[in-house]
Amino acid sequence: MTETKKIKSALISVYHKEGLDKIVKSLNNLGVKIYSTGGTQSFIQELGIEVTAVETLTGYPSILGGRVKTLHPKIFGGILGRRDESGDIQQMNEYDIPEIDLIIVDLYPFEETVASGASHSEIIEKIDIGGISLIRAAAKNYHDVVIVPSQKQYPKLQEILDGKKGETSLEDRQFFATAAFAVSSAYDIAIFNYFNKENTFQAYRHAYDDSKPLRYGENPHQKGTYFGDFNKFFDQLHGKEISYNNLLDIDAAVSLMSDFTETTIAILKHNNACGLASRDSLLDAWNDALAGDPVSAFGGIIISNRNISAEVAEEINKIFFEVIIAPGYDEKALQILKQKKNRIILVQKTSELSTLCSRNLLDGLLVQERDVKSETKESLKTVTNSAPNEKEIEDLLFANKIVKHSKSNAIVLAKNKQLIGSGIGQTSRVDALKQAIAKAKAFEFDLEGAVMASDAFFPFSDSVEIAHEAGIKAVIQPGGSIRDKDSIEFCNAHQMSMVFTGTRHFKH
């Protein structure tokens, strides 16, 4: 039989009616026989178009409060019957089952109902049975049947109705079937995750309906795609298409800034902060963040937790950077920042990230809770004879927030709520500390009175010894090494203070 099929009959049963009128009129103009149910049937009739009620076809009314409408052999036989199987055709004739060539259906808004805070019973009623069954049946028999499972596919169907007079190719029908299984699988996953919100069943399911092809992945020879809803977090006001690496930096920037409530600006490069400062004024925060490492800042990502003024924009505009993120911008600030046509300007709308994070490896998935713990003054345990003073505690907590978001092994040096040096991604903690000190000295910072934060414990006393030689007076670390006493004894002998947090912040 030919792979080209003409749509002669259609079953339409949808929850959302927007955009349906044009399709129904096109079907009517092509002489397509239309079957429908309930509210959809009334909608079609109000358009002045002839429609046959499903109850007329099946001989049964809608029962059980609307739970059972289309679940009937005359409906599913008309969908699943194979047009090239003589046995199927014989049975369809015997039982007076009409061929149904097109199914237009959508599903009850389950996820929207959950998000609305509805009761459990209301949510359960939004688990679609008839719709999901129609979708799967029609998609299975895509060789003969067209399935339109959501409004997203309306434009493609309209193109076929208008441009091809209702003639579909096998390729067309397979496209719709693929879309159908994407819809049905995502729907089932949403239901599963609702029932499994306490993680009582050890399985991980997630679906992304939104996708964006990227220019490439980490490197030009790698293909890349972003699956997710970028617009949930940002409005892009200006600039070029966002890249794979931009997205990695943007995610790191949002995670980092979520730990800061004071007026703060951070500059990130390769997912790590290379400059960060908290100040009373945003302009001072920018100047001191940039001073932390003006070399690495070139081509970086800038994030602010306050609106960008024209004054601040003037200063930021003096360096080359790829992305700027802020909750808002003054009109004049936007005019300044838009002077570079490729510069990406983002308005951050939310920082509410998922409570879980995942990573692909070995053809599997690692899933863990997001590290949302942020230490406070009350959670610090002084383990040395000397306790840090109030100013040092402020700097220790500041440095600890940064080291939490830095690649391990990581050491952060800070002074007066300014990042003055960091060592990141090193294979030894001593190397990380030496790198941090070298960077601080390269940009002429005075380390006398600075503080040090480590993302994990010190296995030996060598790190605190090196820190002491550099002028560092206070240290924050998780503690937990079997040789903690060596570091504590050295600090006691050299009038250094050290606090334990009890929490390790590895970031691999």
Image (cartoon, rainbow, N blue to C red):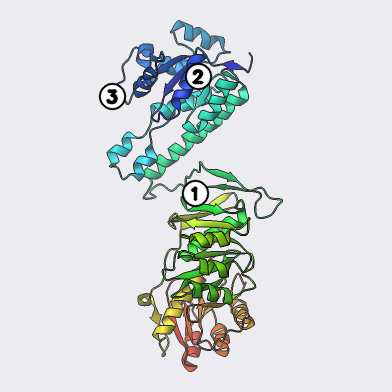
Residue 64: give its label.
3
Kind of residue indicated by mark 2: Ser
Label 1: element kind: helix
Residue occupied by mark 1? 231
Find residue 480 and report its horizontal and vertical position in percent: 46, 76
Image side of residue 342 versus residue 201, left or right: right
Q: Residues within 10 Å of mark 3 (few under 14, many from 20)?
A: few
Q: Measure the C-alpha gap from mark 3 to mark 2.
A: 33 Å
Quick one: 329 or 409, which is closer to the camera?
329
Sequence order check, earlier mark of 2 and 1: 2
Q: Which residue is mark 2?
A: 26
Residue at image location 57% in from the left, 70% down from the top: 315
**C-alpha gap between disc 2 and disc 1:** 33 Å
> Is residue 9 among the parts visible in the rendering?
no
Q: Residue at x 53, y 32 (%)?
A: 179
Considering the numbered disc 2 on the image, is that residue within a helix, a strand or a loop?
Answer: helix
